[in-house]
Amino acid sequence: MGSQAAVSFLTNIAKAAFGLGTAATALSSSLYTVDGGERAVLFDRFRGVLDQTVGEGTHFLIPILQRPHVFDIRTKPHTFSSISGTKDLQMVNLTLRVLSRPEVSRLPTIFQTLGLEYDEKVLPSIGNEVLKAVVAQFNADQLLTERPQVSALVRESLIKRARDFNIELDDVAITHLSYGMEFSRAVEAKQVAQQEAERSKFVVMKADQERRAAVIRAEGESEAAQLISDATAKAGMGLIELRRIEASREVAATLARSPNVAYLPGGQSMLFNLNAGR
């Protein structure tokens, strides 16, 4: 009797444990959690993708019949490059960076048409399409001189194009722009030619200024000579003698201040004068 009671007790415990395990498994499979920055879309085996988007938190579902698919709705960066032709047939390499996120209310549609990897399927293709369309409207040099206008046109066109796929773009920026080797060499040659032209222009201006200075100097000397000639005609040679005396005075003053100049008496009696001193 005691052994039968023990066996019955253990059997009841095993059944209870099995029941609790089954209930726990069923409860666990009936719950799912949506973390912060995420949204979920439910797929029902009978009704398909449900139209309602599930928010953050823990939610119930029907096991086996329903399955959740979680989307990350936080803004994510994407970078891609494109080689495009300009209006003047130059090849340009552009790198574009976009910040994208899905439109939350349209997540069921996104899941039905594109799946969870919607951004990798859409953004590179429409980005290349928009870049090629915009770059073809400008010449190669205009991409530098009118870069703000180019960036604004790319941003406007890409945002409009992404909305067709229920994708929101928070930012669009051209991060890199480079030209082909032929265009780079042409730009360098043009810069060298411009520098040479500026240098030639400077040489011509300098020669012109020197010519004008020479003409002014010659006119001044001519006027001075005319004034001296007129003064001489009126006052005789007195003016020339006055100028000669003034020049001699300046020379004498200069020599007097020099320590290396010795003065000797003039005439032939210098040696006699030395002997007379003895």
Image (cartoon, helix red, strand yellow):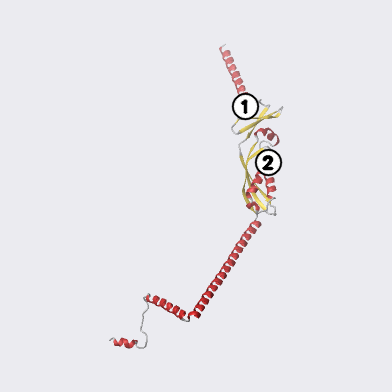
Measured from the top left, where is residue 108 in percent x and y?
68, 32
For residue 248, above or below residue 3: below
Instruction: Work out whether residue 2 or residue 225 is closer to the camera in this orientation and state it.
Output: 225
Q: Please, which residue is most extreme toward the top here? A: 1
Q: Residues within 10 Å of mark 1 (few under 14, many from 20)?
A: few
Describe residue 33's horizontal placement relative to residue 112 as left or right: left
Q: Residues within 10 Å of mark 2 (few under 14, many from 20)?
A: some
Instruction: Work out whether residue 66 or residue 206 is closer to the camera in this orientation and state it.
Output: 206
Secondary structure of residue under mark 1: strand
Measured from the top left, where is residue 187 in percent x and y?
63, 58
Residue at left offset 62%, top offset 26%: 59
Three-letter code, disc 1: His
Name the image quarter holding the N terminus: top right
Three-letter code, disc 2: Lys
The disc placed on residue 26 is: none
Disc 2 target residue = 160
Query: In terms of image quadrants, where is residue 260?
Result: bottom left
Whether residue 121 is visible, yes or no, is no
Whether residue 194 is visible, yes or no, is yes
Q: Please, which residue is most extreme toward the right here? A: 46
Give me the C-alpha separation between circle 1 and circle 2.
35 Å
Disc 1 target residue = 59
Measured from the top left, where is residue 240 in percent x and y?
46, 80
Instruction: Looking at the image, tell me whether mark 1 or mark 2 is earlier in sequence order.
Output: 1
